[in-house]
Amino acid sequence: MTYDAAYPSVLSEREDQLIEERRHKVGTILQGQPRLGLALSGGGIRSATFSLGVLQALGKHHLLRFASGRVLHSHLMMSGVWRLAPVTRPPRPGGMMLALWTSTHVAALYRCPNVRLLEPGEPLPRGL
């Protein structure tokens, strides 16, 4: 790594350590995956509100394709959220609409106003 006065290596190394610790707590599903950083400009409540709206708009539609050819479509609107947890610490059921389990993790969907299971060949919702 080269030296960068704006981002010293001691900060970079500490950040790497914290990211790996967090990924370890979440479980192995994120370990070894590429990292993604997102920077939003501004420092006031208006810019924060705008940025939140942009992020929510980006995360509204989720499509999950199954080997059977079915597609799970969730539209999170402004309140829905997916949460990932290891099976050793399953998510709380309150408000949960759907849970997808693997041998190591569970993905839980909360407060989602629109969830559909599309059959093979059924058209995707408009705008996707």
Image: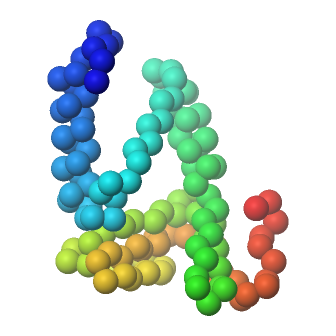
Could you say which is closer to the camera, residue 104 or residue 53?
104
Q: Where is residue 116? Give x, y as percent.
A: 65, 81
Please tell me which residue is depicted at 43% across the width and 81% down the height of the picture.
99
Percent position of residue 73, x then y = 64, 74
Quadrant for the C terminus, please.
Answer: bottom right
Is residue 6 found left or right of 24 in the rendered image?
Answer: right
Comparing 91 with 122, the one in front is 122
For this rendering, which residue is in front, 109 or 33? Answer: 33
Can you name the residue that lies furthest to the front here? 1
The residue most toward the top is 5
Looking at the picture, does residue 61 appear above or below residue 57? below
Residue located at (79% from left, 85% from top)? 121
Query: How far across and down, in percent of the image, does residue 47 sit?
Result: 54, 27
Toward which corner of the image does residue 104 lie, by quadrant? bottom left
Q: How many marks?
A: 0
Query: Can the viewer see residue 95 in this picture?
Result: no
Task: Report if residue 6 is visible in the image.
Answer: yes
Q: Quadrant of the N terminus?
A: top left
Say which residue appears at 58% left-offset and 82% top-offset.
Answer: 66
Q: Position of residue 20 (x, y in %)?
A: 23, 48
Q: Horizontal placement of 4 versus 117: left or right? A: left
> Colour scheme in the image?
rainbow
Residue 85's quadrant in the figure? Answer: bottom left
Of the pair 15 and 75, the residue shown nearer to us: 15
Instruction: Using the image, determine if residue 4 lies above or below residue 115.
Output: above
- Please, is residue 113 above or below residue 48 in the view? below
Is 92 rendered above or below residue 2?
Answer: below
